[in-house]
Image: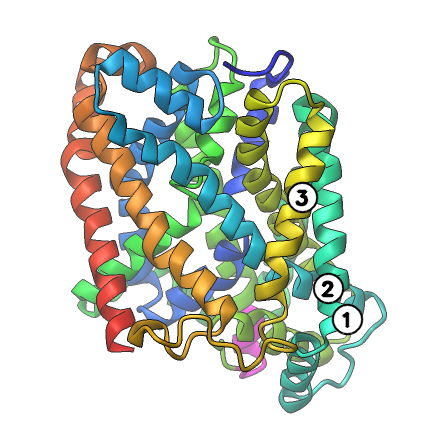
Amino acid sequence: MAISGSKWTSERLFLLASIGGAVGLGNLIRFPFVLGENGGAAFLSIYLLLVLMVGFPLLLAEMIMGSRGGGGAVETLQKLIKESNAASFWKIIGWLSIILPFLGFCYYSSMVGWTMFFGFEAITDGFSGLTATQSEANLSALQTDAVMMILLHSLLITATVLVVGLGVKGGIERVVKYLMPGLFIMLICLVLYGLIFGDAAAAYKFLFQPDFSKITMQVVLNALGQVFFSLAIGVGMMITYASYVPNTVSLNRASLVIGFGDTLVAVFAGMAIFPIVMSLGLTAEHGPGLLFITMPVAFGQMSVGGFLAILFFGLVFAAAFTTVIGMLEPIVAVARSRYQNLTRMQVTIIIGVLIWFVGLAPTLSDSLLLDVRPFWFIPLFADFNVFRVFDFLVANLLLPFNGLLLALFVGWVMKRSDLEESAGLGRRAFLLWFWALRYIAPIAVFGVLVISLIQAFNH
């Protein structure tokens, strides 16, 4: 059962927290790059379609589970298994829904640390006259600075523990109440700047005029993977957050709002980044290169680049911080229900300390543990450093696997009458959602899982 007092005080704050938990570096780092590499508007068209066909059904499925379970992910699965007279095997969903955010926080912390450092650099006007070579060297110097990486790792975990330890009302709601509107304001300012001063014509043509001849099966699979990655499906956050929702909240409407809000941030990120990058003739590099190498160079070439850099990295940190809050809360919810003799803050601190210790390994992957290959005896992992091992296990294996289990459990195991009662959809809408959850979502997620494994083995 949910711990007493763990309820959202309003639907608006629940939606802000959920959008914040879903919005993260995947929207601001991965989405613009994947969009650029996969045909721009053609990719975006497929992505938006898959948000409706796969993202929305899975989001609503998780919210129904959380609302009906009324507790942490493990307790929720235990209750739903009993209600459905299902096999105990399905408890694995509950355990994966706390293992995934734990491991995810451990290595995600490194990238959020980079954001914190570059935000400080922006405040001190550290990008003025920066060249691409210097920018790349700055990122490399940060990654290899063990002391600085540990400091940033520690600061992030301390801040997250403080917010989550204060509870839903006293901590999470207070943060998202201001941070999420601030995120949207900063994002809109950057979009407006790109529209007025960047090469908006070329950028918007690339973003919004699709050339459907560029659509291939690989583009579809990449779009599907981005939907899954961006909406934070399968990490336990939505199950936990939905367990705090009052019965008066419409779950299907909330799912649409969350999916739309998350997608809007991703699209706006492209509208902010591409006009600036294209106007300066810079290249949108893969992964962290776009955010931490290309964008600092761009800001260094602008007359108001210092101010824009502060806005940009403030935006990125806001998105990342609300995400790590959403990672920690599912773990705390489960632990709190099992150790009720401890206060929420005590439980949160203990978990935070565990994440700090385990997270040291990926945090130091490019410095003290540079030459460590933990699974050197397994061919697939032979060249993976610690950070890459965490990333592969979470993003390529466990995340899609848990999403597949979620779709199968809700679509094929839970009672249809329970789903109809909780979904709050009209008959036709329910049938469409139910069909998508039973057939489209499992096939799509299984495809992502298989393709990601094939690509990993080929790599």
Q: Which residues are magenta?
A: 275-282
Label 1 – label 2 distance at C-alpha: 5 Å
Residue pictured at 74% horizontal, 61% vertical: 152
Disc 3 residue type (three-letter): Gly
Whether residue 293 is in magenta: the answer is no
Amino acid at dot 1 = Val
Element on which disc 3 rests = helix
Q: Which residue is mark 2?
A: 150
State left or right for residue 237 relative to residue 211. Answer: right
Q: Are marks 1 and 3 in contact (CB under 8 Å)?
A: no
Q: Marks 1 and 2: CB-CB under 8 Å?
A: yes
Residue shown at the point (29%, 34%) measured from the top left: 406
Q: State whether residue 20 appears in this view.
A: no
Label 1 CA crowd tier, 10 Å (few <14, some 14–19, many 20+): few
Q: Is residue 83 above or below residue 199?
A: above
Q: Position of residue 425 (x, y in %)?
A: 28, 16
10 Å crowding of disc 3: few (<14), some (14-19), many (20+):
many
**Residue 147 tag number:** 1
Q: Is residue 242 above or below residue 381?
A: above
Judged from the image, the secondary structure of the residue bearing numbered disc 2 is: helix
**Camera-nearest residue between 206 and 86:** 86
Looking at the image, tell me whether mark 2 or mark 3 is earlier in sequence order.
Answer: 2
Residue at image mark 3: 352
How far from the left and from the top, in percent, is residue 129? Answer: 76, 86
* Residue at 58 percent of width and 81 percent of height: 280
Where does the image place residue 448, in percent across and percent down from the top left? 25, 55
Please indicate, yes or no, whether residue 111 appears anywhere in the rendered image.
Answer: yes
Q: Residue 224 bears which disc, if any?
A: none
